[in-house]
Structure formats: structure tokens, C-alpha cells
Amino acid sequence: MQPEAASTVVITALALGLAAMAAPTRQTKTAILVRGSVGLAGLIAIVIVPTLDLVALIVLALGAAQAGLPGGRTFASRLRAPVFAVGSIALGLIFLRVQGPETLSRFGAVLIVTGLTAAVGLVPFLHTFDPEEPITLSPVAWMAFIGPVLAVVVMSRAKGILVGEGAAMGAILIGLGLVNVVWGSLAAWRSEDGMAAWRYSFMGDWGLALCGLGLVVADGQAAALLVLFSIVLGRLPLYVASRPAVREKSTTDRPINLIVAALLAGSAPFAGFAARLFLLRGATQLFWPLALVLAIAMVLWLPGSLRLGRSLGLPRGWQAVAVGIVVVLNTVIGLYPRPLLFLAGL
Amino acid sequence: MVAAAAGAAFLAWLGASIIVLSDGRRGLALGLAVASAGLAIVAWQSSGPFAAIAVLAGGGAAAFWQDRSGGGAWNVMPAGSTPRTLLCVVAGLLALWVAASVITAPGASQRFAVLVVLALAGGSVLSSDNIWGVRAAAAILALAVADAASLGGSSLWTFAAATIVAIGVSLLPMPKTNAA
């Protein structure tokens, strides 16, 4: 079992508890805990199984299980992305394993990245989104809960198969990452629907994670892992807590809203800031104009994050406790990321 | 051996095409049965009899439950299915080109069978809103993933997992709010 995958699963389990705590009603808490536990079992299986083929089959099983639950979107529309992802990964693995021209192996690497982005639901493979759908049935579950572990496992396993196609995979990851950074951060700011804005903000963070995964230096990998941790431990519980206020379209301007906005924007001293520093350092080592582009793109987070922070409302009771824990954990990870990265084998 | 491999490739293409072209329970069940027979022969040649039995069990069970559920009887090639027919032909030709010409290693028939099922199952899910068709495509995709893994020398666990997923997908209760 890879240490980075194991630590991501542990973080995800912790986030599941926080998300349940932040849920507004008892019914939602139960749904998150029960369905989330099934998802967590799937994630543990993804980490344990020895091959990417088995990982693909577990993704298909998770997608089918989610599509089988009653919800707003059709069965077909919910199963589309997981099936496309599994097909892409399987085709990519065939192309990487067989003898053929070099282009075929590169195409295989591209297909694996395509499969990963389709499973997570990033541009250009956006899942259909219903703002009223419960979070356990929503594409956000793939972005914020299943996606981070899946990305860590797929990337670490794929590196074992890739012989000379690391550069091709890195290039496509960085390209897709930049597209998602710009698309996600702008849409989180400009989108009319509050729920959709949260969903796009996940996409923006994923863009940074893809850029980090694409950088073949240690700082890039550290940045990707920290961004994924901040998605799971920060954005996910805050999204769950904010859903009632977003539905009511109410905004609040209390200090906690500003703190949450800073956390979502990746400001100091939160985890997102450390991730951004690692990312810029890694990009500078590899190709400094990329660091310049990323630094400019990071500014786009501010307006969207202010909007999302205000949409949190004023958390009370267990929600306030959950938001407090999220802020503390993200501050600790932001100030001292090294112990966590050490546990993750970086 | 060569004739069996060619037959398996043809069965896989035919079965996957029937899944793409059918909207009725019997048509989909027939497609699942035929495609899984083709994939089982490929599994036998690459991983032995137990792998073939696993694929046949998964495909057979999925076909059985498909026949017990869903609407219509056969409904193969209903009106307006020209794009789906084209998909079957183009996917077959593309898979044949990649399996036999682009990839230089031996075993073109097995590769064709796997590639064409992956492509057609994926195409079916992407292009159809028929809940039963999507379920059948997901089941055969799981079996094709195991066959694809066997081309790289996978263990029997992959086939066992694929069988469980194929049966599980077929047994899924259909969500009440969107069963149409």
C-alpha cells in the first residue's frame, strides 16, 4: 500500500466525520455517514488492490451503486462518467502494455489522464449537475470524496507502467490543470447559482492538483497532495455546512465568513497557501513562465472565495464545531505541512 | 486456435453491437450472452478455463436478469437507429485497424475483441438514455476490462471481480424517480 494513498484515505475518513457533523439535519447526517461509509470501503479497496484494472472495476461498482440510488438525474446520466472513465483507463492500459509505435504508448498515457478527469468530473468531462440533489448523489461526491484517493492511486500506479511517457502525461495534466484553474475560479465567481459556484470552486482546486501531479519534481507532488487534502478537509465540510444558506440565497458578513473565505482562497496560514507555495516553487524549477501563469491564475480565487465564504451563513451548534475544526486543521496543515507530507512518503 | 480466436472476436463484436442496437430486454439479453461468449473464449486463451467460466458466469447471469427485467421484447434496430448502426461499423473498423495494424504484437483477434467491446459499451452508455441498455453496457464493460487486463497477464482475481461487478450492476434496483 502506498503511503500517500493510505494517508489520503485516513484524511478522507476524517473528512467524512466532519461532513456528517456539518450536515444541517439528522437525515442528511445519516445519509452522509451510511453512504459515505460504503464509499470509504470502496476507497480502501481502491488503495489495497494491486492493479489499475481492479481499481477501474471498483470505480465502475461505485458509479453503479451511486447511480442506483433515487435522485434527480437519470440513471444513464449518472453512470456515463464512471463508464467513460473505466473505458478510457482500460484502453489506456492496453496501449501501454502492448508492443507498438511510441505514439500508441503516449496515447495510452493520455487516455489514463482522460479517465481520471472523467471520473472526477473535470473539464472537459463535466458531469451533469442538479443543485437540489443531495451531496451523496451529486457529482461533488466524486470531486471531493472519491476523486482525491482515486487520483493519488491512479497516478502512483500509472508511473509504474509508464516507461518513457511521463513527460506526455505531465504535459496533459498541466494543460488540463490550467484549463480547470481558469474555468473553475472564474465560474465560481460569475455563476448565478450558488451550488454551481461551489461545484466550480472544487474544479478550480482540482486544476491546481492536476498541475502539481503533472510537475515531475517533489515540490509538485507535495503541492498536489496538499491541495487534495485541502479539498477533502476544507472545501468538502464547508460545502456541506453552507448548503442550507445557499439554498435560501442568504449571505452573511461575520468574521467567520471572512476566515472561511481566506481558507477557500488559499491565503496564509491555511493549507491552500502552503500548497500554492510548493506549486509555484515546483513550477519555477521546471519552467518559470508556468509559475507566472499559475501565480496570475491564483489571484482569480479571491472574488469567488469571498462569495462562497459569505454564502456559508452563520454556523450554529455542531455545524459551528465542524467549521471550527476545519479552520484549525487547515491552519495546522498550512503552518506545519512537513509531518503530513512525511507520513505520505514525500 | 486461430479460428477460435477469430470466432471469439466476431462474437464479441456481434454481441456488443446487439447491445448498442437493442432497446428491448430480450435483445439486450441476447447481446450480453453473445458478447460474453466471445469474451469467454478470449479469457480461455489468455488465462485458462477458470477465467472463461468466470466471464461466462458473469455474462450469463447478467443476461438472465436482463431478460427478467426491462421493457419491450426484442426491439432490435428500432426506427432512428442509423447512428447506432454506424457506430457499430465504425467502431469495428477502428478496433480492427488498431488491433491488427497499429499494434504489432501477436494476438490481434483477442485485442480486437476487447477493444471493440470497450468502444461499443462506452459508446452505448454515452449515446443512450435507455436505463436497461446502459445497465447491459456497464455489465459487459466490466467483463471486457478483465479481458483487457488478461492481455497484460492479470490474475484470476480480476475476472472474479469483473464477474461480481457485472452481476451487481445487473441486480441494481432501478431508482424509482428516474426509472423511465
Image: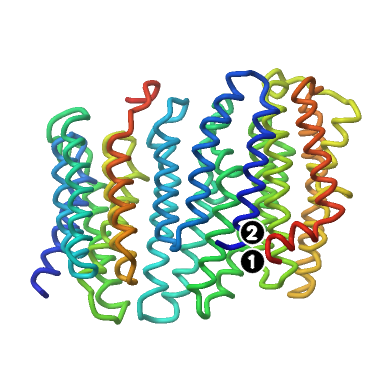
Q: Nearer the viewer, residue B146 or B160?
A: B160
Type of amino acid at the residue the image marks with label 2: Leu
Q: Quadrant of the N terminus of chain A?
A: bottom right
Q: Is residue A191 left or right of residue B52?
A: right
Q: Secondary structure at mark 1?
A: helix
Q: Position of residue A79 (x, y in %)?
A: 41, 40
Q: How many residues crowd around disc 1 within 10 Å: few (fewer than 14), some, or many (20 or more)?
A: many
Q: Is residue A55 left or right of residue A255?
A: left
Q: How many residues crowd around disc 2 within 10 Å: few (fewer than 14), some, or many (20 or more)?
A: many
Residue occupying the point 79% across, 50% down: A272
Q: Chain of mark 1?
A: A
Quadrant assignment, res B71: top left
Q: Chain of mark 2?
A: A
Q: Quadrant of the C terminus of chain A?
A: bottom right
Q: Is residue B123 visible?
A: yes
Residue occupying the point 67% across, 38% down: A236
Q: Which residue is mark 1?
A: A214
Question: CB of mark 2 within 8 Å of CB of mark 1?
Answer: yes
